[in-house]
Image (cartoon, helix red, strand yellow):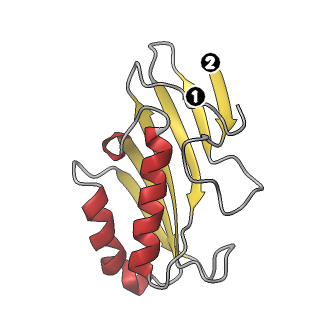
């Protein structure tokens, strides 16, 4: 099993420099599992932040030969769970197929004080999906 950690050069760079954005775990059949770190985005509203997060996730997946259709698990932290419907409306615009497994929970705050949502995903990359070149690589 080969594990690659890094930040794809062709994707938005993380707002926090203290972590890798993607862990890619190669499987024997040529497929891979991608584990994306929690993503946050700038924006004034929950909807803007959620949209920005899914755009970043889409770019990270694309850099590894995957799409949002390949997401198999999603974990979401909201700072206000009463706004779940607002978050869900944006999420449904990006995840249009069979919904992945998911967990959503409320947290008092995130690492950026203005952040209202953080999303972490796992995706299954089909065999033949290319590995991204890390930033600086």
Local packing at callout 2 (Cα closer than 10 Å; few below 14, some 14-19, many 20+) is few
Residue 15 is drawn in which quadrant? bottom right
Image coordinates of residue 116 in percent, x first then y, are 53, 79
Residue at the limit of the structure toward the left, as seen here: 97
Q: Secondary structure at mark 2?
A: loop
Q: Quadrant of the C terminus?
A: top right
* Residue nearest the observer in this picture, 64 or 26: 64
Q: In the image, what residue occupies the spot 30% across and 43% down?
A: 69
Q: Is residue 30 above or below residue 111?
A: above
Are the residues tagged 1 and 2 within 8 Å (C-beta)?
Answer: yes
Residue 1 - label: 2
Q: Which residue is mark 1?
A: 25
Image coordinates of residue 113 in percent, x first then y, are 66, 82
Residue 41 - label: none
Q: Is residue 30 left or right of residue 113?
A: left
Q: In the image, what residue occupies the spot 71% across and 61% down?
A: 16
């Amino acid at each position: 099993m080969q594990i690659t950690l890094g930040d794809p050069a062709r994707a938005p760079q993380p707002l926090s420099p203290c972590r890798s954005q993607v862990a890619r775990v190669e499987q024997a059949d040529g497929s891979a599992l991608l584990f994306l770190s929690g993503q946050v985005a700038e924006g004034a509203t929950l909807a803007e932040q959620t949209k920005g997060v899914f755009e970043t996730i889409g770019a990270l997946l694309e850099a590894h030969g995957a799409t949002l259709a390949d997401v198999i698990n999603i974990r979401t932290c909201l700072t206000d769970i009463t706004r779940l419907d607002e978050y869900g409306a944006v999420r449904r615009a990006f995840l249009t197929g069979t919904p992945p497994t998911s967990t959503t929970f409320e947290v008092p705050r995130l690492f950026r004080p203005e952040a209202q949502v953080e999303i972490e995903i796992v995706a299954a990359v089909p065999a033949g999906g290319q590995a991204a070149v890390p930033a600086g690589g």
